[in-house]
Image (cartoon, rainbow, N blue to C red):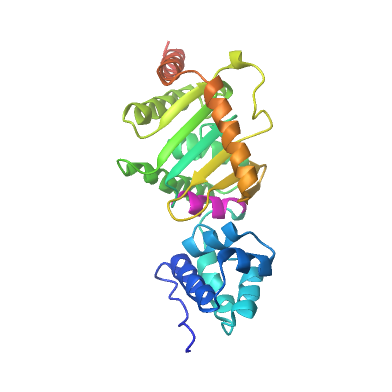
Amino acid sequence: MAGPNDLDPSSSPRALLGAELRHARERMGLSQEQLGQRLFVSGSFIGQLEAGTRRMQPEYARMLDEVLETGGFFTRNCGASAKSKYPEHFAEAAEAEAQAAAIREYAPLLIPGLLQTRAYARAVNRAYDPTTPEETIEEWVEGRLERTRLLDHPTRPLLWAVLDEAALRRETGGRAVMADALRHVSDLARRSRAIVQVLPFSAGAHTSMEGALKLMEFEHAPPLVYFEGVRTGRLEDDPATVAQLRFTFDLLVASALSREKSLALIEALAQDYTHEEHP
């Protein structure tokens, strides 16, 4: 059987690569779980590669070429699917996010990227690296704003965000920027483009005190969870881990204010920032 043609990087390289992987796996008579065992990864990881929700790394491409006898096809073409405008530690998560049917996120320290305004995003990126040239900061901001266009669709994805009260009270970019940022979050919630709840200080100790959490669900691939630290990030697909962290998110929702009370707090804080900016 003739081998597949090299991918055209101008098309959808990750989707095409995933389709070719599925074709080659089925030609060899292997299930996703069986192929995963040969690569020392889970069957769900193979499913995510085939669905295009995960990036194919060069080491896996070489192993796939060997196991599936594809004559170096995946090694030659994995570079096209790896190109990204996002920082390396976040690239896979951002690209998976764009294909998610549902996103559930807990943000302990800042307004999540999908809910940010331009001015807020600029302030956050400038704080990340005070010595970066302004043109680079603008590139980062544009990349973040491009992610927010996911919410332009009237129904997809489902975005459910639990914001810690600390994220609302941490003055980022000045009071005017915060007032506008909180009004933007409120507007998205009132237009039913996001479910937003606030985890108040009064909730005390809670189940995710160790950090942020992002869960992503897909129509044709297993779910993922994303962990992020200082200039680091990791996607996890282990079903037991994902299930445990979904339970963690459910507990956060149970501890948070209702949607109505959350919006009331967000809008009250936006008013406070506005009045303090213009006494």
In the image, residue 39 above or below residue 205: below
Asked if residue 222 can be seen in this view, the reply is: yes
Residue at the (43%, 19%) spot, across then down: 270
Residue at the (44%, 24%) spot, across then down: 176
Q: For residue 66, which quarter of the picture?
A: bottom right
Residue at the (53%, 59%) spot, across then down: 48
Q: Is residue 65 left or right of residue 158?
A: right
State the residue in front, 197 or 40. Answer: 40
**Main SS of the magenta segment?**
helix
Q: Residue furthest bottom?
A: 1
Q: Position of residue 73 (x, y in %)?
A: 54, 80
Task: Give the residues drawn in magenta, as a range.
Answer: 89-98
Residue at the (36%, 31%) spot, across then down: 188
Residue 92 falls within the magenta-colored stretch = yes
Q: For residue 179, which quarter of the picture?
A: top left
Q: Quadrant of the C terminus?
A: top left
In the image, residue 172 above or below residue 36: above
Q: Residue furthest top?
A: 279
Q: Position of residue 34 (x, y in %)?
A: 62, 67
Asked if residue 167 can be seen in this view, the reply is: no
State the residue in front, 26 or 99. Answer: 26
In the image, residue 263 above or below residue 3: above
Residue 265 falls within the magenta-colored stretch = no
